[in-house]
Every structure is written in C-alpha cells, then in structure tokens.
Image (cartoon, grey):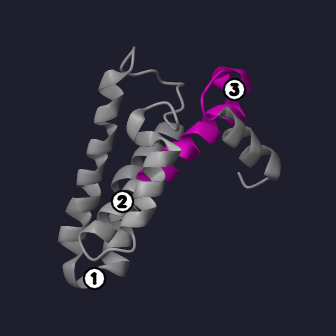
Amino acid sequence: MQAFTHYFLHLFFPLGIAWIFFRSDWKRAYLIFLATMLVDLDHLWADPIFEPQRCSIQFHYLHTYYAMIVYAILLVFRKPFNIIGLGLLMHMATDLIDCLWTYSDCPTCLEGAPAIDLVEWIAKSGLF
C-alpha cells in the first residue's frame, strides 16, 4: 500500500491539482508537474542508487531543506515558475510521507537518516 500511495501522489494527485487549480491550462500544468520528477536525478549520486527504506529528505542534494526553500520561493513568481515550485514541493511532501510511513512501520530502519529528527518530531506530534 505504501508504494501505491507513493506513486499515486507522484502521478495522479498532481493531475487533480492541475485540473482544479489550472483548469484553463491543465494539460500544460500537469506536464510541468510530471517534469518536476526530474528532481529524482539526484538519486544517481547515491550509493546504492536505490535503497527501498532510505528517506530521500535531506539525503539527496535536491531534497534538502535549502532546496525546498528555493522551491517555495518559486511560488511567488509567475507561471510556469510557480507551477514548477508547487510540483517540487508536492514531490518533497510525497517523499516525506514515504519517510513517515517507513518510520511508522520500522523506526529503526531510519536510524542515522539525515531527516530523522524531522520525521520523529512529526510522528510524535501526531500529525501523521
């Protein structure tokens, strides 16, 4: 169920956001949202490239808090930059949800993860 939710949030949730908030240009907005998946190219610098229980947040270069600040700043610009920023932030939120899900199933699996403090704080706060 976790993998289904992860890919649903990456592929189909943005379609709904494009349809609801960018109705006049929803196809273009959705394609931009899909293009923001290229942010995962930073996984190529990881060793191993894919680790199923790794939390991407704060681990990969384009998944850091500093990068997320840049993505948030993009929201104040005109199209297509605001759509790019929104797509990147939705991607980060999806990856964070994945981290939280992994943590809830196996807290020790994320020991030493760079974002463990954030994940533990969210988990203890009852937000997830």
Find residue 2 and report its horizontal and vertical position in percent: 53, 39
Do we see residue 5 in this rendering? no
**What residue did someone put label 1 on?**
23
Distance from disc 1 to disc 3, alpha carbons, whole Å, reads 40 Å
Q: Nearer the viewer, residue 112 or 10?
A: 112
Number of the front mark, 2 or 1 = 2
Residue at 48% over, 56% down:
69
Distance from disc 2 to disc 3, alpha carbons, whole Å, reads 28 Å
Q: Is residue 107 left or right of residue 34?
A: right
Find residue 55 and report its horizontal and vertical position in percent: 54, 32
> What amino acid type should be assigned to the residue bearing mark 3?
Cys
Distance from disc 2 to disc 1, alpha carbons, whole Å, reads 16 Å
How packed mark 3 is, by other alpha carbons closer than 10 Å (few <14, some 14-19, many 20 or more), is few
Q: Is residue 78 above or below residue 98?
A: below
Secondary structure beneath dot 3 equals: loop
**What residue did someone put label 3 on?**
106
Q: Residue furthest top?
A: 47
Whether 94 is among the magenta residues is yes
Find residue 96 and report its horizontal and vertical position in percent: 55, 45
How packed mark 1 is, by other alpha carbons closer than 10 Å (few <14, some 14-19, many 20 or more), is few
**What residue did someone put label 2 on?**
87
Whether 70 is among the magenta residues is no
Secondary structure beneath dot 2 equals: helix
- The magenta-colored residue range is 89-115
Secondary structure beneath dot 1 equals: helix
